[in-house]
């Protein structure tokens, strides 16, 4: 079973508990803090993934880092994970929780990749159109990739719209190859 599947199995009851106790926003902030801390500190992720380090030591590190910074429900989850030797998937649990939180709040994360940064007015216009079409609140992340030559790639969940010049050239090349060999 994949780590994401296992992480989802922990994230879902955490979400249910957060909903029951009206702590959804607090626990989401905790999961964001955990994720950002792991992303900024490779040593922490390495420690959490290291099977040689005992669970109680990992839990003491988590307590030292987060004891007074996270909700008690979140700290309880850390303790349960340490008890069951599942600390290595904490990062994935934070990602799974964010996915559940976004579904609950009607938020859709969208990634726009272009060759150059786009203007704020164009970002606002794109965000408004996507919000209208998807009937969700849009969080737009922008990436710049000069290798696209021109155009854009829009990623919405598991879908991707590749309207880049590079992709167009690749499609054109494939059409020529198919016509030559058919």
Image: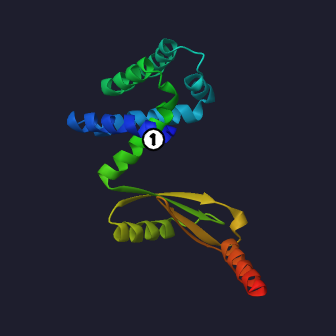
Work out which residue is located at the far front of the displayed protein and give it: 182
The residue positioned 47% from the left and 31% from the top of the image is 90
Residue 107 appears in the figure: yes
> Residue 166: percent from the left, percent from the top?
70, 72
Of residues 5 and 80, the one nearer the viewer is 5
Image quadrant holding the C terminus, namely bottom right
The residue positioned 39% from the left and 33% from the top of the image is 30
Of residues 117 and 61, the one nearer the viewer is 61
> Residue 52: percent from the left, percent from the top?
60, 16
> Residue 146: percent from the left, percent from the top?
71, 64
Q: Is residue 24 left or right of residue 41?
A: left
Circle 1 residue = 5
> Residue 11: percent from the left, percent from the top?
38, 37
Above or below for 115 versus 92: below
Q: Is residue 140 left or right of residue 41?
A: left
Helix, strand or loop for disc 1? helix
Above or below for 140 versus 176: above
Q: Is residue 73 left or right of residue 87?
A: left
The residue positioned 38% from the left and 34% from the top of the image is 10
């Amino acid at each position: 079973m994949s780590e994401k599947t296992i992480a989802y199995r922990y994230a879902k009851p955490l979400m249910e508990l957060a909903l029951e106790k009206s702590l959804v926003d607090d626990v989401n902030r905790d999961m964001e803090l955990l994720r950002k801390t792991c992303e900024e500190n490779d040593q922490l992720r390495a420690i959490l993934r290291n099977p040689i380090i005992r669970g109680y030591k990992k839990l003491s590190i988590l307590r030292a880092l987060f004891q007074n910074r996270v909700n008690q429900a979140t700290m309880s989850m850390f303790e349960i994970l340490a008890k069951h030797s599942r600390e290595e998937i904490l990062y994935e649990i934070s990602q799974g929780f964010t996915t559940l939180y976004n579904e609950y709040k009607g938020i859709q994360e969208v990634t726009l990749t272009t060759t150059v940064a786009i203007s704020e007015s164009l970002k606002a216009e794109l965000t408004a159109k996507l919000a209208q079409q998807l009937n969700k609140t849009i969080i737009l992340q922008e990436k710049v990739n000069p290798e696209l030559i021109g155009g854009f790639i829009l990623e919405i969940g598991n879908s991707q719209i590749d309207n880049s010049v590079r992709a167009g050239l690749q499609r054109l090349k494939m059409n020529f190859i198919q016509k030559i060999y058919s």
